[in-house]
Amino acid sequence: MSRMTFVLTITLLEALTGSSGWAQSTGKPLVNKGTPTPDCSARVNVDRNGELPGYTADWDGKKVCLPFTLTNQLLPLGIAPADFYIKDFSDGRIREKWAACKTDPGCAEKIMTAAKAFAKFEPRDTGTVDKNGVIDFDGPVDLANIRRPAYFGKPPYSEAISSAEPRTFVVEFTVPRDGFEQQHLKLSGDIKLRGWYMRGHGVPDGSGKEVRALVIMNNGGGSEFTAIDNSETPPFTVDKTSGDYTPAKSDARTEEPGIRYWRGFLSDLNQAGFDVLIADRRGNGISGGRNGFNTAEQANDMFRELDQLEKGKGLRILGPDGKTVEGEAAATLLRDGASFRNIPIVVGGYSRGSYATQWFMHKNFVENCNYDLAKPTCAKAVGLSNIKGAILYGPNSAGLGYRLAGHDAVEGALRVEFNTTYYVDSIVPANVDKWPALQIIKGTWDYVEGLEGSFDTYQRANGLKDISVFLGPHILQTQNPANMKFAGQRMVAFATAAVLGRKEVPGSVNPKDLKELVTSVPHEWELSSKP
């Protein structure tokens, strides 16, 4: 998630609730019935700057309080979980809530102001520090002008992703504009999605053979995967007056703070043998488009990308040899004797990219609905049999019921007034049991949804599954490098098990409750919050 999107989201939370902090109210429950009651509290800095509840753990003979994010909306007294978290946050219900809100001018103004923040142009960051990498995202592009892995190998970056240079293709896909751009901005024609396709050596199957497999990854909101993240930029600053900690901002050395950790995950997967496809999502970075918030349309884009990788129409690539190839010849080169209808595939995403991933899985395994219309349309599931699982990093995996009150009406307004599907509603977590495999990775005080929601989704999943947490917030730039290494290792372990058809993910905690999950964290603190 970019700094701009992070600030925008925090502002929205405060506008809807009056506060972004946590305070215990005497006599009021902190967690839902059946969840172990927190037994301690601890201060965290980025990005809460305050006390959070936690569970006590024993670290090498010392008692430590491990904090986590509480559930935003606890289950109302006497209401069944399915009636509240599922039935009350469906597409139909959030449209009804927005319709009711519209009758109250005060409510309508507040919700529309919030919705407009998620239906707007996001300025590009790539190229603000080094003009090498700047492109005209709206016009034709020389693919040679897009930064490649080798760019990030030179000092002071020295990123592991540079080792993928000899096997990386710059790719460009052709997709239609979304409903917001067509109907509200009156734009027509196609746009281009641009990124990298990194060939892997194959995933070892334990018998001496290597299986070709693909992971498709999706950035967080506003993130740009070819942006500069200079490790010399301090990860946070401290206000001398208030003592509050603020995450790093873009500066003269860094375009996107924290994005090097995201590229680190790509490198981990590629070095483990996976082919990796990463493209800036529509409306972001080196990809075209003006609206970066329609996550369900971004899910549709992944189906389009797979089709173009298979058939070639709309595809253009630049190989490591410097040659540009288009159409069927480009697809033939990337297929390399295989088929993208047969190669086992795992789809993953961070934050807003995880929403796109969730919609993709729902469209493939449950039903293919388009909610960014006045009247939603639905078709049968796409049904690609080679989709083997999903990685959700920093997600809102449990849908709108686990977000702050008011976000459901905002999403209703986005769908009805702006032809944009942004947040995941309850239909997705309600059907996560139909997915073949699920992994959730996040910091324990990730603000996007309380950890109870993530654990609820994990419990709903029936196939191969893993939930892995560490001590940290949602954003990347202040994370402990050791925890980012842990996250990358968990992604590799899960993706490997998924594509090879394993029944368990090596190293999974398999927690029986929330306390067991929280106390499973590695013994490494987020950089600003070390006790």
Image: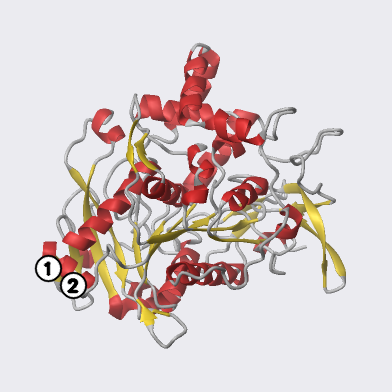
Label 1, label 2: how far apart the Cα atoms are: 6 Å
In percent of width and height, residue 499 lies at 43, 69
Q: Residues within 10 Å of mark 1 (few under 14, many from 20)?
A: some
Front in this rendered view, residue 289 or 36: 36
Pointer 2 residue:
333
Helix, strand or loop status at disc 1: helix
Pointer 1 residue:
329
User: For the residue marked with disc 1, what is the amino acid?
Assistant: Ala
236 lies left or right of 521: left
Q: Are marks 1 and 2 in contact (CB under 8 Å)?
A: yes
Front in this rendered view, residue 298 or 111: 298
Q: Residue at x 51, y 69 (%)?
A: 231
Q: What is the residue that sits farthest to the bottom in this orientation?
A: 208
Q: In which quarter of the image is residue 271?
A: bottom left
Q: Quadrant of residue 73?
A: top right
In percent of width and height, residue 100 lies at 51, 15
300 lies left or right of 524: left
Helix, strand or loop status at disc 2: helix
User: Which quadrant, please, contains the C terminus?
Assistant: bottom right
In percent of width and height, residue 63 lies at 86, 64
Q: Residue at x 45, y 60 (%)?
A: 389
Q: Quadrant of residue 158?
A: bottom left
User: For the residue marked with disc 2, what is the amino acid?
Assistant: Leu
Q: Residue at x 58, y 45 (%)?
A: 448
Q: Can residue 114 be seen in this view?
A: no
